[in-house]
Image (cartoon, helix red, strand yellow):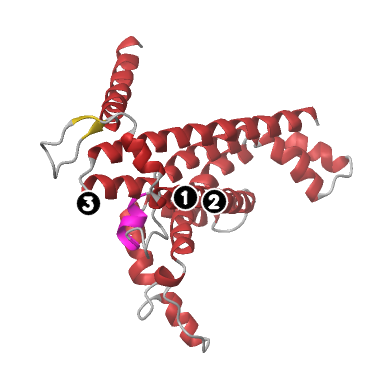
Amino acid sequence: MAPAVIFLLVWMIVPLAMTIYYAFQNYNLMMPTMRGFAGWENFSILLNDPTFWSALVNTLVLVGACLIVTVGLGLVLALLFNRTFIGRGIARTLAISPFFVMPVVTGLIFKNMLFHPVYGIFSWAMRTLGLEPIDWLAHYPMLSIIMMISWEWTPFALLILLTGLQSLPEDQIEAVRLDGANRWQEFRHIVIPHLGQVLYVVVMLESIFFLTSFAEIYATTSGGPGTATTNLPYYIYLSAFFQYDIGLSSAAAIGAVVLANIFAFFLIRFVAGNLNAGGQR
């Protein structure tokens, strides 16, 4: 396994080391002669930039809201598809199909086919009901992005949770039913503890991807209106490819890495605590 481990270490450490190096350098592509060691200047500029703090808040809101929606809706759908009914195979295939749509395509579908204030399906439905159509991306930009990402990632939660449900032993369910447990008690004391590790995996993997959400924002709102949907990845993109400030964008990337690690630390403690509490019960 040594060659694979070495390859992965090089693959991760080299870009990280270069990012740390450039974070402490004056390096703007528009001013190639102004090079040199900047110390903590890039981080100072970053911490005094209100756009950075707005992007940080937007990132946390986006991750938290998408986790709640995808895990909650994915669990409901998993419980539904775990039952036997006519056409279950076709329904499962249709339910997980959004996960295979590319993020840019997802953004374009929602922007032009669903959210468009004139030609969108939502606008048509509202006009049919006698209501005034809404320009979703202009008036509710963050909600629109959350809806896109949730639509795309709910099938992932559904697929993983459904796999966990199918590994639940039937004798446990039959035993609690014979003991007189109702549906809620069965769900709370048997199903949820059994899905503990699966939920942990789903939350961790989705958190990683939600923290790096970019394509949906790029294809629809471009971080706007203003900075309403600018998250950390899009802020880094603007710093690197619009301001051409490699030093500042590298400092922002380091901030994003620190945020991801802090988020993962508290998330692991939270999930592990709930799992231990569930095991003790």
Mark 2 burial class by Cα count in 10 Å: few <14, some 14-19, many 20+: many
In reply to whether residue 267 is colored magenta, the answer given is no
Residue visible at 41% across and 34% down in the picture: 257
Q: What main secondary structure does the magenta stretch of the protein show? A: helix
Residue furthest right as drawn: 180
- Which residue sits at x=85%, y=45%? 181
From the viewer's side, name the closer residue of 238 and 220. Answer: 238
Quadrant housing the C terminus: top right
Question: Which residue is identified by label 2?
Answer: 70
Disc 1 element: helix
Q: Nearer the viewer, residue 194 or 260?
A: 260
SS at circle 3: loop
- Where does the magenta region start and end? 214-221
Query: How far apart are labels 3 and 2 at the CA level?
Result: 33 Å
Q: Which residue is mark 1?
A: 153
Residue 87 horizontal side relative to residue 188, left or right: left
Q: Position of residue 265 (x, y in %)?
A: 55, 30
Image quadrant in which the N terminus is located = top left
Of the image marks 3 and 1, the number of the one nearer the N terminus: 1
Which residue corresponds to the image point at 35% horizontal and 62% vertical from the top-left? Answer: 221
Q: Would you identify the image quadrant in which residue 180 lies?
A: top right
Q: Position of residue 248 (x, y in %)?
A: 29, 40
In the image, which is nearer the foreground, mark 3 or mark 2?
Answer: 3
Contact (Cβ within 8 Å) of mark 2 with mark 1: yes
Q: Which residue is mark 3?
A: 242
Q: Amino acid at mark 2?
A: Thr
Residue 33: give x, y in percent of width and height. Answer: 10, 36
For the residues marked 3 and 1, what is the alpha-carbon distance in whole angstroms?
Answer: 30 Å
Dot 3, crowdedness within 10 Å: few (<14), some or many (≥20)? few
The amino acid type of the residue labelled 1 equals: Trp
